[in-house]
Amino acid sequence: MHRNSSPGDVAALFGRLVDESLPGRRGEPAWRALLQAHATLIRQLDTDLRQDTGLRLADFDVLAQLASAGGQLRMTELAARTLLSRSGLTRRVARLVDDGLVRRANTAADGRGVVVALTDAGIARLTETVPVHLQGVSKRFVERLDEQELAILETALRKVIVDCTFG
């Protein structure tokens, strides 16, 4: 905080900036709810998964992305599919290699790219964690919404994804 600014001044400044940048504050409550719901769900799902299986949610995500792609992906593609930064993914994959859950190899095509692949131990770990994770998703998200709410939410979020990806 600036030395001469009081908390009230900073709050007023922030409010004015939001008012100027988002006319009528249209969508602000929905945006804040989305951010809060996402952060809350991810934290809770991570806690639940770690307590029940010892696996972090980000590790699970890497294993699940590999499985959904048939067991292996180039590192660049894996980075695009996960919610991790490139450097964060590199460190996470290194830990998963150390744990024996994935293996890393140079691509056969050009030798420059890196492929990450599930090991048998990784498949076994995924087999035990998928049901636990999806039970958490069901309990903490799906069961809280009816079919119409789920459909509306999916449609709205897909519009955002398409716009951000292709717009």
Image (cartoon, rainbow, N blue to C red):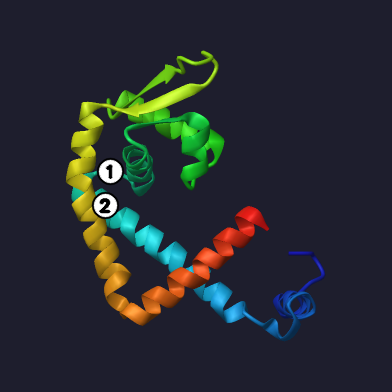
Q: Reply above or below: 82 against 20.
A: above
Check disc 2 and report the residue beneath it: 49
Q: Are marks 2 and 1 in contact (CB under 8 Å)?
A: yes
Q: Nearer the viewer, residue 157 or 86?
A: 157
Q: Nearer the viewer, residue 12 or 7?
A: 12
Question: Looking at the image, which residue is at 27% across and 25% down?
Answer: 100
Q: Reply above or below: 151 against 51.
A: below
Say which element carries label 2.
helix
Check disc 1 and report the residue beneath it: 55
Say which element carries label 1.
loop
Image quadrant where one finds the C terminus? bottom right
Residue furthest to the bottom in view is 24
**Residue type at mark 2?**
Leu
**Residue type at mark 1?**
Leu
Image position of 109 (left or right of 100): right
Which percent across, then down, holds residue 76? 53, 32
Question: Looking at the image, which residue is at 23% across and 35% down?
Answer: 123
Number of numbered markers:
2
